[in-house]
Amino acid sequence: MPKNIYRPSSLPRAFLCPGSLRNVPAEIESSGEPARVGNAVHMALAQFIRCGVGDFSYAASFYGVDADEVRWLYFEGVQWWERLKPFFEGGRVEAEHFMRRGNIQGTADVIAWLDGDCLRVLDWKSGYVLTDAWHQCSAYAWLGEEEIHGLPIERIECFVVWLRHGHLDKEHYTPEQLAKWRGSLDKDVLAKPKTYRAGDQCEYCRKRPKCRAFGKYLMAASDCMGNVMDAAHHVGLGAVYARAKQLKSAITKFDKIIALRVKTEGSVDLGDGTQLVQGMRDKTTMDLRKAWTILTDNFTADELVECMSASLSKFKKLCPDKAHREFLMSALEDAGAIETKSAPHGLKIEPIEQPQLENGGDKADG
């Protein structure tokens, strides 16, 4: 039996930082709220695929998360399944199917062994950030290939549905490609258990608090930011910015940990005659349900608009039915109520577009 077992979801990070796999339990980290929301959505969708209906309210209650959010994501998944279901017909379909092959194990959200020579796998994603799921899909495809039990197979297809974004990724594999991927995993990842590379992949790594590579990564960021102007004109500005993002994230998480301790255990004596306590301030709010009649009797619609705002994302959660939501959005757009405009929204790193060469030829010799 293999000493270490790895999950497909851990492999995208591992190809960037092989050391992230060392001594990490095979169980999925599920204590954070986003993870618990994902678990609730997966539970309800698996029930829907098996039985034709999913109890999203029970799933939300079981994991202690917001029922409205789970409801919205659940119905997004239901609508996606209705679109993708024809691709999974004609064979054995299973929801939440556990697989293990060698030192990799995972649970496919939906898997189908189709008549002929095709295997299809579907993975639900409920996260906020779109990421590259290629290595995770490769692992599911490699696991699914073993489930064929020696039957001939020519292609494996993986569907990744990003529920929050309404986005679908699809990957195709052949047995030869999967064998090459597995070789790369052995050579470039598992054979380098003490190789650590810090970067954006550190964001949700459980080894981050004690990782020396990550510590050095943050120290480099703080050194560069010691003189802001020098950092702003540094040729490695992109690298500095990437480190700064991780530094900001680490500080935010540290602040939350300390705040949680103060909230649960009380004040903390700092040893210098001071203590860390929970700060308090008054916050006045208005219950619009109770105030609505009074407001509309005393102000015009134009006046009320100046002090209120509407959230499109919350509006969409109120309309889980896609057809109804699209109808209302179309009506709002026809009324001129929906406006889309570009506005600054933080910084990001993206590839530089290269100029297209005429006739599609190669670059000219120097």
Image (cartoon, rainbow, N blue to C red):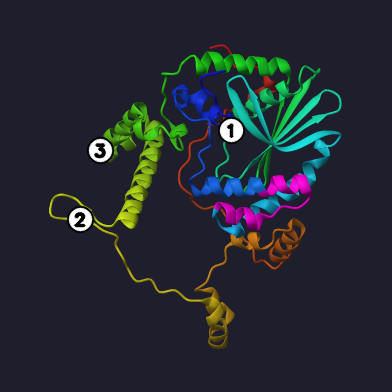
> Would you name the residue on which mark 3 appears?
227
> For this rendering, which residue is in front, 305 or 105?
105
Furthest residue toward bottom: 297
Which residue shows up at 67% across the image and 22% down it? 142
Residue 182, picture quadrant: top right
Asked if the magenta segment contains residue 42, the reply would be no
Q: Residue at x 70, y 68 (%)?
A: 335
Given the image, on which type of amino acid does mark 3 rest? Asn
Amino acid bearing label 1: Asp
Between the residue at mark 3 and the residue at mark 1, the CA separation in whole angstroms equals 35 Å
Residue 199 in the image: state x and y as whole percent.
Answer: 43, 31
Q: Is residue 279 left or right of residue 160?
A: left
Cα–Cα span, label 2 and label 3: 32 Å
Residues packed near mark 3 inside 10 Å, few (<14), some (14 to 19) or many (20 plus) = few
In primary-sequence order, the first of circles 3 and 1 is 1
Q: Which of the two labelled residues, at mark 1 and mark 2, occupies the earlier sequence position?
A: 1
Residue 222, horizontal then vertical, whole percent: 29, 36
Residue 350 x, y percent position in the rendering = 52, 35
Residue 197, quarter of picture: top left
> At x 86% / y 34%, what residue is drawn?
90
Image depth: mark 3 or mark 1 in front: 1
**311 horizontally vs 277: left or right:** right
Question: Please, is residue 206 above or below residue 187 in the view?
Answer: below
Q: Which residue is mark 1?
A: 132
Viewer-side residue, 145 vs 216: 145
Where 302 falls versus 161 (above or below)? below
Which of pointers 2 and 3 indicates the residue nearer the eye? 2
Q: Is residue 49 visible?
A: yes
The magenta stretch spans which residues?
Answer: 44-63
